[in-house]
Amino acid sequence: MKRRQFITVAPAGGARMRSVAAAQSAMGQGHPEEGGQHERLPLSGREGPKTPATGLILANLRGPGTARLAVRVGDGLLDITRAASALGLVVPQTTDELISNGEGQLRQCVTSALAAHRDRWLLAEESAAFAPCVSNPQKIICIGLNYRRHAQEVGAAEPKAPILFNKFNNALSYHRANVPTNGLPGNHFDYEGELVIVVGRRCVDVPEERALDYVFGYCTGNDFSERTHQMITSQWLAGKTSNGFAPIGPYLVSADLVGNPNALRLETRVNGELRQSSSTSDFIFNCQQLISYCSRLFPLEPGDIIFTGTPEGVILGMPKEQQVWLKPGDKVVTSIEKLGSLEITVA
């Protein structure tokens, strides 16, 4: 198998942190496919485990019925759902269940499956049918204008507090997906490569210094956009949440394997041409600030995802005479250090 290549922060400044604090102060406080019937993990509400899983690179796989959980092992993917069904083990069936309910017998499943039948449930990454690496978030929160150089390229002032908007679950998509654009009432399609935070525990009114304790992990995302309808009013939603406009994945990487999320390289290429090359060190509001700020406005639940904003290099930021919008057939690949590459094709 061909081995996937990974790209080998300073926190936001004190003045910006004070402005966030001021804004906060102002507002106040299964499908068994082998081995017979499979026992499902009990649902336990939306609190999430106090100690999130560690040392895991996870994916959801598409197939008949619901998504299936997989763990990256070496260069391949171990189909946990099918292996556990055959081995009689109780495991989460998707990343969403793992985030909300814990690991169950996941690690025993990995050990037993590799020891007894390594090739039976091991898939090559190149042939895997990925699903969104989080399939049913309660909230998809997005942050606008959160990189200094991106704000500069579009001629906007740096915001004094995070700019929040959202997408809906119909926008979720996956690695190697076709993003449908035919028939939509606009044709100014643009990419936005982004780091995505995945919440691991219920998070309410959390201070910045504890905010990362509530993170399960991170993934690569693309805040795919149609600029005409994004800009038609002051509210951006119309250009942000059509079907397939929120691809994420292929992997959900546990927070301990990522380390500091505010110092990750990010690149986006269109048809092989480098368009975005930056670092999350250019954040205006770092991950801790975003989580804390959101948690004071509304509860963050296990599995909620936060698109943290895009760096410079988007089509919207180019001089008008150089703007060539995405069209059917264009391939967009966003790569983030330690998380891997997310590929989509405009359709």
Image: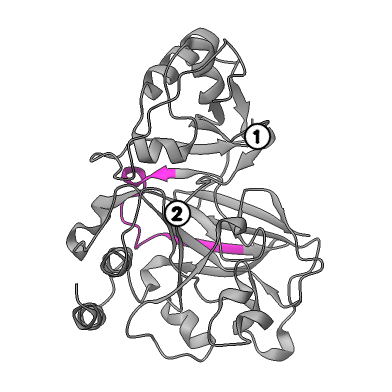
Q: Which mark is residue 128?
A: 1
Q: Is residue 294 above or below residue 58?
A: below
Identify which residue is drawn at 52% across, 31% down.
Answer: 70
Left or right: 22 as drawn, with respect to 231:
left
Q: Which residues are magenta?
A: 253-268
Q: Residue 108 at what x, y percent from top left?
A: 38, 17
In percent of width and height, residue 149 lies at 46, 81
The residue carrying pointer 2 sits among few (fewer than 14), some (14 to 19) or many (20 or more) residues within 10 Å by Cα, namely: some
Q: Mark 2 falls on what kind of element?
A: loop
Of residues 247 and 232, which is closer to you in this image?
Answer: 232
Which element carries disc 1, helix, strand or loop?
loop
**What's the residue at 39%, 86% (across, down)?**
158
Visible residue check, residue 8: no
Front tag of 1 and 2: 2
Q: Residue at x 68, y 83 (%)?
A: 228
Q: Give the quadrant of the N terminus.
A: top right
The residue that mark 2 highlights is 138
- Give the percent coordinates (x, y) of residue 206: 21, 61
On whether residue 261 falls in the magenta region, the answer is yes
In the rendered image, residue 91 lying in the magenta stretch gets the answer no
Which residue lies at the image location 43% right of the left edge and 24% below the top edge? 91
Residue 82 lies in quadrant: top right
Q: Give the Cα separation between the discs numbered 1 and 2.
A: 26 Å
In screen coordinates, is 14 left or right of 265? Answer: left
Instruction: Report which quarter residue 294 is drawn in.
Output: bottom left
The amino acid type of the residue labelled 1 equals Ala
Q: Can you see residue 66?
A: yes
